[in-house]
Image (spheres, helix red, strand yellow):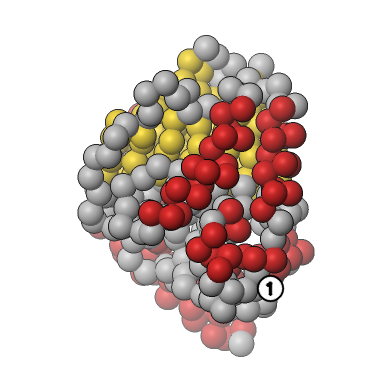
Amino acid sequence: MKNIRNFIQTTLVVSSLLLFSSFVKAQTPNEWKKLKDDINVFMVNDMGRNGYYDQKPIAELMGEMGETIGPKCIIAAGDIHHFNGVASVNDPLWMTNFELIYSHPELMIDWFPVLGNHEYRGNTQAVLDYGKISRRWVMPARYYTKVLRSGNATLRILFLDTTPLISRYRNESEIYPDASKQDRQAELDWIDETLKNAKEDWVICVGHHPIYADTGKDTEERTDMQKYLLPVLHKYGNVAIYACGHIHNFQHIKKTGDNIDYVVNSSASLSRKKVSNIDGTVFCSNDDGFSIIAASKNELKMYMIDKKGEVIHTITKSK
């Protein structure tokens, strides 16, 4: 087993270096410095492809940018493992989808995950328990919150478990066996109480599924998110951004009369090429990549980064 792991690791490193060198980075480290603020967080999702497609090159790019920006942590917003989740904490997918891919020294920081629908096809408890194996995997519960502080700035992130909020997954118990076992109302009550008491400069909520998005996926996914989650996010008027994955492209949606910016973060391995404007679309792109959240006391920014390291869109919130 050790020899096999060494061979896999060597193969992935050599392949990733060749692939990464084939991309001409559109920005330099000096330009990346402009993205840095008091609090910096990377966000990645829909990445579990065993290093294939653009996963390893984007992982290397994250490390390169991390040398300049210095993120405090990384959000992993679901579907870390395509296609059927993991079987246990010892599943080899942990090595080929995560440990050997995100191996840059600057990525050896805390990762805060949420469960995606593909995790719900497997052993969801193993995803939580993996924190006992990997020091950088921090997942204390299926939904939880974290407050980041630096300088005069504070940022609260709520990490949500969105699969059990959607009836389709709850009803398909043979495919998603754990979804119907979760107490939907208990999570909504927790979100309500957490937002009620949130006094930080900025509050962001992160889940796997979108509330609004252009997608060919079942309409019921979005309508259930609008029915169950959206009223709670609106209740106290303090949520700046709801960010998610699932759709495999970049989208920024802003609804009239709504203070929340709805952000779909693209896949960090393989994007879906078709994306169009819907009501409220500010920006959309079929690039793959990841995002960077940067916060100061009076300003919050979220940068969409393509696989060349170029900022293709910026969401800005000011006080």
Please, what secondary structure does the residue beneath circle 1 have?
loop
In this figure, which residue is indicated by the disc labeled 1?
A: 89
User: In this rendering, does residue 189 appear at all?
Assistant: yes
Q: What amino acid type is highlighted by mark number 1?
A: Val
User: In this rendering, does residue 101 appear at all?
Assistant: no
The image shows residue 91 at horizontal and vertical percentages of: 62, 78
The image shows residue 140 at horizontal and vertical percentages of: 75, 53
Judge by depth and name the residue closer to the eye, 196 or 52.
196
Q: Residue at x 45, y 48 (%)?
A: 223
Q: In this rendering, is residue 121 above or below 21?
A: below
Left or right of 308 on screen, residue 106: right
The image shows residue 286 at horizontal and vertical percentages of: 26, 49
Q: Residue at x 27, y 39 (%)?
A: 278
| Total numbered labels | 1
Left or right of 3 on screen, residue 284: left
Left or right of 163 on screen, residue 308: left
Q: Quadrant of residue 16?
A: bottom left
Q: Residue at x 38, y 59 (%)?
A: 218
Quadrant of the drawing holding the N terminus:
bottom right
